[in-house]
Image: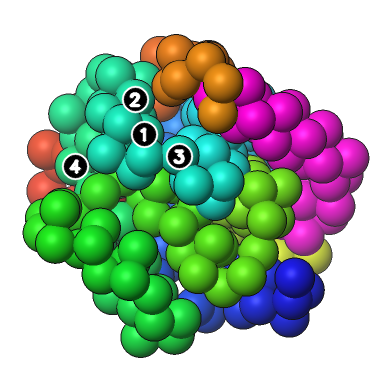
Amino acid sequence: MSRAALLVLADGRFPAGGHAHSGGAEAAVRARRVTGAADLEEFCRGRLHTTGLVCAALAAAAALGVDPVALDAAADARTPSPALRDTARKLGRQLLRAARATWPSEELDALARRFPKGAHQPVVLGLTARAAGLGAEDAAHCCAYESVSGPASAVVRLLSLDPFEAAAVLARLAPELDRVAARASEAARHVLLEGPDALPADAAPLLEIGAQAHAVLPDRLFAS
């Protein structure tokens, strides 16, 4: 396995479209639930242990070779908000375009044919990791990191937060990120034996509600 490939995939400059999304941070800033670095840390922690865990487990399962169609259905079932489902598929479509150009793979081509409008982003990420020669825990780490790095970067722009403070937030969350990635990888191994019902289904209702309200705002800085 190539650690360099993991760095490429996790790099915020990889052209997967994530820069246009705040992971719910913009809605949280508007609602004044995030006003500074301390609030950002709690927001990211909550996101990591709920939607971050679910997405990391989906990615890990896809990296292990679990049927991506079944995983996509499981992702739908774990995403009540239509706005978030739409966002996940848009991000999945953009990631798939970048992945197919970077790590050509028949599995990625087949996924593009099966989901012309986009599969859920974590499922695509897991298959991309597989195409890049990475393992399930690599995919889980990448997905878990995305779940907090996106909001942290967004809040720097939304609040003019000192980027050093945002980086410190991510550094403090690193041990928890490792634990979430390990838990997600373990859940993915159970999926091989028990099917997608073994995936975690931890929820973050405020993220779902915020996404629906955010989707109809005329003056958004971020798409989600």
Q: Nearer the viewer, residue 48 or 57?
A: 57
Q: Nearer the viewer, residue 141 or 208?
A: 141
Residue type, label 2:
Ala
Q: Secondary structure at mark 4?
A: helix
In magenta, the rendered stretch is: 166-191
Q: Which mark is residue 219?
A: none
Tell me which residue sits at (15%, 53%) in the image: 114
Comes first in the chain, label 3 or label 1:
3
Which residue is denoted by mark 4 in the rendering?
86
Which residue is denoted by mark 1 in the rendering?
71
Q: Where is 129 relative to 79, above or below?
A: below
The main secondary structure of the magenta stretch is: helix
Q: Determine whether label 1 and label 2 are within 8 Å by CB.
A: yes
Q: Which mark is residue 66?
A: 3
Q: Is residue 84 visible?
A: no
Comes first in the chain, label 2 or label 3:
3
